[in-house]
Amino acid sequence: MLNTLIWAGLIQGFLLGLLYLFSRKYSSLANRLLGGFLISLVIEGTSIFIPYDYIGKYSIGYYFTTPEVKLFFPLFFVHFVLEKVGISARYQRFLKIHYGIAAGVSSITLINIFVFLVTGLQIHEYVPIKVVEAVFMGQQWYAFLLSIIAFIIAIIETRAYRKKVENEFSDYTMLEIQWLWQFIFIIFPIILLWGAELMRILLGGTGDSDIVLASWGLLIIFIYFVSYKAFGHQNLFENQEVESKSMVEDISEEPAHTDHPDLSEKINSLMQVGKYYLNQELTIYDLAREMDISPRLISSCVNGNLGVNFSEWVNNYRVDEALKILEDADKNYLSIEGVGAEAGFKSRSAMYTAFKKKTGFPPGHFRENV
């Protein structure tokens, strides 16, 4: 039964991987990375669970006789996360080095096939088996340690992304990354099981292990999770623009608390008069240009004196604006989405998030009680 579920998951992962790799409609680097991640899982799973020991006279039961793609797992995983939060360029050198090593390890299988086609023999018949085994286990441990590093990087950078959005952008939809956290943390127990299996082997364990089946059971759940998210939310994996536009200052660090009550009042007054919050794409840098005030100073006032982050501050104005529209009898023709758009919200979900956060109720509640 488990084998059937695993093969069904591998087939689904293969088809979904192809979709992400070659889709023209949703073509993006992030999607291609996700497709590569899924395809590498399928290749590894197929080499483990295929019920044959030979393809013709070519043995597939020895080290490096099938493609070793484990090193690609952590690389595609962390590269995808970094691409989604917009900072993959920062890790370009790290990624290039490890992609090169991963490609080199995978190419050993191609060399093995070439040697077999020319001589009828395989690498392990030319090189002492202990050497081949040492190289094989070495790259297994290397891939495992790289997975831990990738997991840590993914957590750190996703947390940093959320903090950046809260303090620089006004679009709440950019904070809706719960799916990305799920994507990251569903990998964690798989890494733990992988480490447990390597320790079992290191301590002298041999033969098939239930740990391998358990880890692949989780991997199949992961494939189904990605499939559900992909088809349940068609725009979920589309690119997001998270880099600050026309950055005037670097305010990535938490602004120091400074006491500027008069300036805070001025900023609030300018926001009310200028209604800059109606700009759905408003960032702290856009506002800084409009108000002719340093973005760092705005951030300091909003965080320190007003007690909220930039995103919440702007969206509170939008909620107030939406409430006025909902109370306006002349605008009863507007749908909830229309009200949100007029109030500066970029999407329905952003509007609902802001309303629930400030009032505890969805926007429809206020239309019903007008």
Image (cartoon, rainbow, N blue to C red):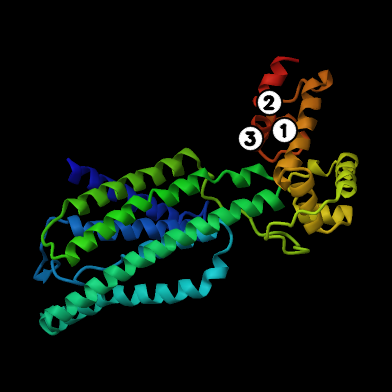
The residue that appears at 70% across and 59% down in the rendered structure is: 244
| Residue on which disc 3 sits | 353
Q: Is residue 178 left or right of 217 when viewed as pictured?
A: right
From the top left corner, tell me how far across and down residue 296 is, in percent: 78, 58
Q: Which residue is mark 2?
A: 363
Q: Alpha-carbon distance for marks 3 and 1?
A: 12 Å
Residue 13, image x, y percentages: 33, 50
As drawn, the residue found furthest toward the top would be: 369
**Label 2, residues with CA under 10 Å away: few <14, some 14-19, many ≥20:** many
Residue 351 found in image quarter: top right
- The numbered mark at residue 2 is none
Q: Earlier in the sequence, mark 2 or mark 1?
A: 1
Q: Secondary structure at mark 1?
A: helix
Residue 32, position in %: x, y?
46, 59
Q: Residue at x 82, y 21 (%)?
A: 328
The residue where tag 1 is placed is 340
Nearer the observer: mark 3 or 1; the answer is 3
Which numbered disc, 3 or 2, marks the residue that appears first in the sequence?
Answer: 3
